[in-house]
Amino acid sequence: MAWFGLAWPGSSLAALSSPDAVRAAAEQAVHARFDLPGSRVVAQALPLDPRLRLAPCAAPLRAVLAEAVRPAPRLSVPVHCPQGSGWTVRVPVQLQLFRPVLVTSRPLLRGDGLRPADVRAEERDLTRLGYGYLDNLDQVAGRTLARALPEGSVLTSAMLGGRRMVRAGDRVQVVARLGGIVVRADGIALGSGDNGARLRVRNESSGKVVDAVVHAPGVVLALP
């Protein structure tokens, strides 16, 4: 929890509990909660009900925003006067929380592998990204797309398929089991796939192309 006191030398008690002071306390609490490195916060407290009459407060106002509160376009921030029994008023605050996220730099097809050139960082309002977002290239390394995306799409975890253990053109180890004998050979993958995917591999020594199943990163099992 965080609290903020607003008080100025010589200010009247009425000023300390004025609508402007209450709104300012709410905005400061929102900034303190969400203004982290790499983020940009725009918080605007909405006008209070003009019929509201607050008793003068001799103590600094406290605006409390719990750590569990998630960013949303509109928040309700409680502002409290801690003097005696005091009073509490909830202040509606409009929030925009901007942060660089990964977006597609060109149209991409389902099954495409993601390369650094396929994405770029753009500042977006996180409160409008209800389906999540990705902000680090490590999160997309080796991943494929589960569906086609137009340029400028914000990437989310749900849009990504599995990591490709083998990519077309990779040097792989081909393992063949002949009875109780295990034979290993170097090959070149002619397709891409994750664990269990079938693809074709060319033996580097003989040039023969065989069918295989991806077993591990860089390792395929030759099919009989």
Image (spheres, helix red, strand yellow):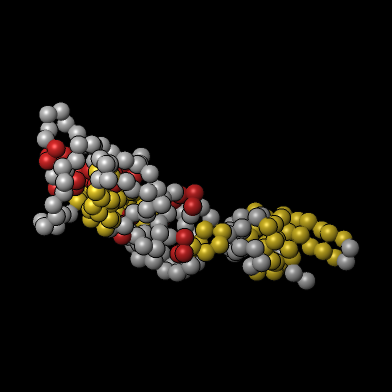
Q: Quadrant of the N terminus?
A: top left
Q: Is residue 183 left or right of residue 77?
A: right
Name the foreground residue: 153 vs 189. Answer: 153
Q: Residue furthest front?
A: 84
Q: Quadrant of residue 182?
A: bottom right
Q: Quadrant of residue 163?
A: bottom right
| Location of residue 3 in the rendering, given as x and y in whole percent from the top left corner | 31, 40
Name the foreground residue: 50 vs 95. Answer: 50
Q: Is residue 158 left or right of residue 153?
A: right
Could you tell me which residue is drawn at 16 percent across and 31 percent down?
8
Could you tell me which residue is drawn at 40 percent across and 48 percent down?
67
Q: Is residue 27 left or right of residue 135?
A: left
Q: How many marks?
A: 0
Q: Is residue 158 left or right of residue 17?
A: right
| Location of residue 136 in the rendering, given as x and y in whole percent from the top left corner | 44, 49
Q: Residue furthest right?
A: 180
Could you tell me which residue is drawn at 31 percent across and 57 percent down?
72
**Residue 188 visible:** yes
| Location of residue 108 in the rendering, given as x and y in whole percent from the top left corner | 41, 64
Could you tell me which residue is drawn at 25 percent across and 50 percent down?
88
Q: Residue furthest bottom?
A: 224
**Residue 38 visible:** no
Name the foreground residue: 180 vs 88. Answer: 88
Question: From the viewer's perspective, is residue 146 above or below residue 22?
Answer: below
Q: Quadrant of the C terminus?
A: bottom right
